[in-house]
Amino acid sequence: MTTTITSTPSRRRLRLDLAPPLAAAWLGGWGLLALVGTLTGAGYPFGANDPHGGGANLLRLVPVAVGAPLLAGLLLAGAVTALVLADAVRPPRPLRALVLGYGWALAFVLAVVVPDARVLVVLGYAPMLILGAPFGWPPVDYADVFTWALFARCAALVGGVLLAGALLAWQRRTAGACLSCGRGGGARGWTAPDAAARWGRWAAGTAAVIPLTYAVTRFAWAAGVPLGISRDFLAELRETGLVWAGAGLGAFATVGALLTLGLVRPWGERFPRWMPGLTGRRVPVGLAVVPATLVALSVTAASLGLVTSPQFWAIDGGFSLTTAPMLLWPLWGVSLGAAALAYHLRRRGACRSCGRG
């Protein structure tokens, strides 16, 4: 026997209702491109086909002859799954578990496994690339930065996020929870605002400290201090210009750490005095949660590829202050995601659709 779930319409519900068709269209389109690449032998930008090397990507472990058709099959199956998620009918429990299990596993692969450090690096360099482009600095060929390989990784991340949104909406709908807020009753336990404020502070503190450990070493090298590395290795970094790239990422990490603290500070809820025109206004929840979630996913994806890469462990002869801060990145990604979730739970307030909260 099947049951159709209905709830009060709202703008948020309408946005969630768009997630399944958007996910189906995105995954289906990329699945067809992957299928064409499989048949023609061109366009698969991972592993041996990666023009910049696939050492920091887990897909390097999959032969191209296997990876191309496998990716095409996963994407097309994901598109079919997304179409199933558009149905408001509650399926039998085993089928529901199967759909959710495959869907969440695929969303994880697309959002965390397929992307790698390249996405995070571009996010870190974006301010320099945008502001310096009119002045010809940094002296890089943008065609070498914004490649098909990078675009494919970003596309996988988008597909994973869209599929996760569709899964979340369907999971709520088929569980009888509110489609807009996900509540099945009053907020209680770890999701209650008071509880989220407590564990959210620990998560935000952890997520702020870890990138600062990375920034300190990179700033020291830029200042000519061989903190944790040999003077010869520092000289090599300065000769190649990599020391300034590290300083740029260190600056990005420092700004990110300060913004992370905003998830648990009053100025993260209302714009501070030093922002004329916005002073005292409420900070939109999405303005904090969306960027934090994007960085959390990118950091986690980068860390998985890096710590499993032989090239990473060969840097500076093995374990050192060059690599040690990045070993904490998996914890950084998880704690930043948790801090963003706590911020959302603390500020979401009463639901306009169901009135709970």
Image (cartoon, rainbow, N blue to C red):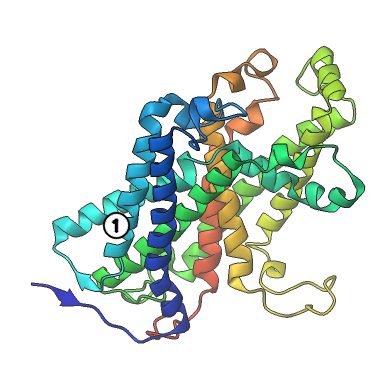
Q: Is residue 202 visible?
A: no
Residue 320 x/y as whole percent: 67, 20
Q: Is residue 141 left or right of residue 313?
A: right
For the view shown, which residue lies furthest in the front direction?
Answer: 40
Please, what secondary structure does the residue beneath circle 1 have?
A: helix
Task: Name the residue beneath numbered marker 1.
Answer: 80
Picture layout, residue 20 above or below residue 297: below
Image label count: 1
Picture quadrant of residue 352: bottom left
Q: Is residue 118 toward the left or the right of residue 95 in the image? A: right
Q: Quadrant of residue 354?
A: bottom left
- Mark yes or no: residue 35 visible: yes
Residue drawn at x 35%, y 87% is 8
Q: Is residue 200 above or below residue 300?
A: below
Q: Position of residue 234 (x, y in %)?
A: 82, 20
Q: Is residue 296 left or right of residue 356?
A: right
Please indicate whether residue 123 sits to the left or right of residue 80 in the image.
right
In the displayed structure, 267 sits above or below 150; it is below
Image vertical order of residue 274 relative to residue 59, above or below: below
Work out whether residue 241 or residue 228 is closer to the camera in this orientation and state it.
241
Give the residue at x 65% y 25%.
Answer: 323
Q: Quadrant of the N terminus?
A: bottom left
Q: Position of residue 307 (x, y in %)?
A: 54, 27
> Residue visible at 34% across and 56% down?
79
> Residue at 70% of width from left, 25% of height from top?
322
Of all residues shown, which one is farthest toward the left? Answer: 1
What kind of residue is marked 1? Val
- Name the quadrant of the C terminus: bottom left
Residue 43 position within the rendered picture, expressed as x and y whole percent measured from the top left = 50, 38
